[in-house]
Image (cartoon, helix red, strand yellow):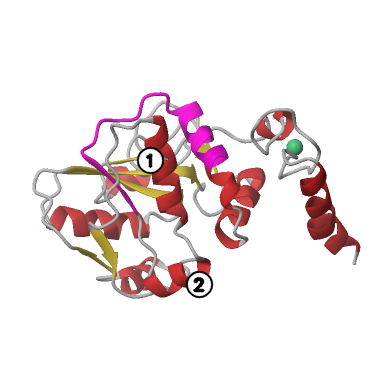
Amino acid sequence: MTLIVVNRILPALLGGLFPNHCCLCQWRCPGAQPLCDGCRSELLANSVPCQRCALPLATSSSALCGACLQHPPDFDRVVAPWLYGEYLAYLLRCWKFEGEQRLTPLLAGLWRQQVPTPPEVDAIVPVPLHWLRQWRRGYNQAELLARALQQYWPGLVVDTGLLLRNRPTRAQSGMNALQRSRNLSEAFTARNRCANLRVAVVDDVLTTGATAGEVARTLKNAGASHVEIWCLARTPSPGD
Ligand SMILES: [Zn+2]
Ligand SMILES: [Zn+2]
């Protein structure tokens, strides 16, 4: 009961009284965004990422992680400015699974804070949800993020029609590489040719890179010359 009061009722009450309460600590914050300076300072920047897959590295002595050196992934690089720590994980869960679409400008702002000038691409493509999942959720969070980034940089072209998710895929956690590859095999279709296109695929988190790899393969098979992944956060490798 106490947890319900803390997690549900108190935020709802404070949300009514103070529209700009911090969505993490629930106290009022003065700015326009629902995140106080104290909680914002707890977010962990991905300051030494692998230049290919954005995996956080222990030192900057090597540009690439061991996995990318051995088996370069199908995407050309990942831009993931934050680490998937406890605070950001909570924000992303609320955003994805609890309908907190008001967090979109905050999350886009966090991306922009770390990436003041986005890399040049011809189109940004949100990772599509299967239609049934999107219908249940009511929105695709990757598309919300892509459109919020476009508001910062109106020159960005958001293309929501290029990529189709053919079937629902199961959550990847706990799967080994072979199971992940089977789970995602032919999960996406490129609906148009994208000859020589430089594409940025937008997603919320990069975990194993399996989804990003499958999307990149699909787009490159359709002719894309360069595929990079823009996401908010990167998880460390398992066990780190
Ligand atoms: Zn706070
Ligand atoms: Zn890497």
Q: Amino acid at mark 2?
A: Arg
Can you tell me whether the CB of the residue at mark 1 lies under 8 Å from the nearest atom of ligand 2? yes
Q: Image check: 164 left or right of 139? A: left
Which mark identifies residue 103? Answer: none
According to the image, label 2 marks what residue? 136
Say if residue 84 shows up in the picture. Answer: no
Q: Is residue 199 above or below residue 63?
A: below
* Mark 2 neighbour class, 10 Å CA radius: few under 14, some 14 to 19, many 20 or more: few
Front position in the image: 144 or 55: 144
User: Could you say whether the residue bearing mark 1 is in a helix, strand or loop?
Assistant: loop
Between the C-alphas of marks 2 and 1, the distance is 38 Å
- Taking the magenta stretch, the answer to whether it contains residue 217 is no
User: Could you say whether the residue bearing mark 2 is in a helix, strand or loop?
Assistant: helix
Q: Image check: 76 left or right of 30? A: left
* Mark 1 neighbour class, 10 Å CA radius: few under 14, some 14 to 19, many 20 or more: some
According to the image, label 1 marks what residue? 65
Q: Amino acid at mark 1?
A: Cys
Q: Earlier in the sequence, mark 2 or mark 1?
A: 1
Q: Which residues are magenta?
A: 105-126
The residue positioned 39% from the left and 45% from the top of the image is 146
Say if residue 30 shows up in the picture. Answer: yes
Residue 240 in percent (x, y) is at 56, 47
